[in-house]
Image (spheres, rainbow, N blue to C red):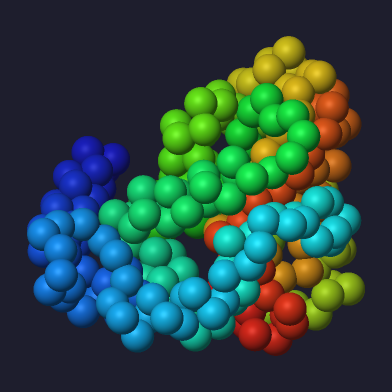
Amino acid sequence: MMKIREALRRLTDAIFFPDIPVCGCCGKELEDRKSGVGFCRDCGAEMEKRRLPAAATDRGVLLYACYLYGGSVRRIVHRYKFDSGKWLAPFLGEEMAKQAAQIPGPLDAVAFVPLHKKRRRQRGYDQAELLAKEVAKRSGLPLVYGLSRTISTKKQSTLKAGERKTNVRGAFVRRKETPETEIAGKHFLLIDDVAATGSTLAECARVLRESGAASVSALVYARSENQGEMADA
Ligand SMILES: [Zn+2]
């Protein structure tokens, strides 16, 4: 069964990987370059308007983000998560790594907010894991598989802020295959694709800290000012 699934995944990856230069947001072919992913003029202008400075906001954990969610940013996030957009990971990860390089203070390791294994199986990949791999590779930091999601929580985006907090409480534990020595004393950069209230990030940070992490800062591709806007993320 796994073999068939893996074969199908490779096939779909091959089909969806663009061999022409395309805009990561709208999928339009780019005429001013030879290959790879970029932004067309319209999407690029809107992405630029939504770009955030490399400064943290506190949502229970110091949170850094590349963009404010919405418009073209929403489109590229959707393409990445819901439209077999695994091929976008290096493109998004590159921007996140640039933002990571601006973060003051020591960082020793990269971790990520994992999907529940059921969701991961459905999607075929864990979007936060792929971004964390890109950030780790580009920043020279080790990627630590520090967390696992024990409860397949109700979709965060359908809940109100208060409900979100209780929804994620206890949803993550230290991944038991990962020894505490890989976590203890380390300053972590915790990666996720998007953040609304920050309650998921705060919960993951709590588990890492309780496993001995010295500190946890978070970096997401996009954050939202209001959770209603994230209803479909
Ligand atoms: Zn475009």
**Quadrant of the frame with the N terminus:** top left
> Can residue 4 be seen in this snapshot?
no
**Residue sitting at 77 percent across and 34 percent down?**
105
| Residue 39, picture quadrant | bottom left
Residue 147 in the image, given as x and y percentages of width and height: 67, 36
Number of marks in picture: 0
Foreground residue among 202 and 59: 59
Asked if 144 appears above or below 118 in the picture, the reply is above
Residue 142 in the image, given as x and y percentages of width and height: 55, 24
Residue 98 is at least partly visible in this image: yes
**Camera-nearest residue between 164 and 93:** 93
Image quarter in which the C terminus is found? bottom right
Q: Is 54 on the left or on the right of 4, as rendered?
A: right
Residue situated in front as seen by the camera: 172 or 144 = 144
Q: Where is residue 192 in the image (x, y as percent from the top left)?
A: 60, 53
Q: Where is residue 131 in the image (x, y as percent from the top left)?
A: 48, 47
Kindly indicate the quadrant of the structure image that contains residue 157: bottom right
Q: At 39% across and 64% down in the image, what residue appears? A: 80
Horizontal placement of 10 versus 137: left or right? left
Q: Is residue 121 left or right of residue 195?
A: left
- Quadrant in the rendering for residue 165: bottom right
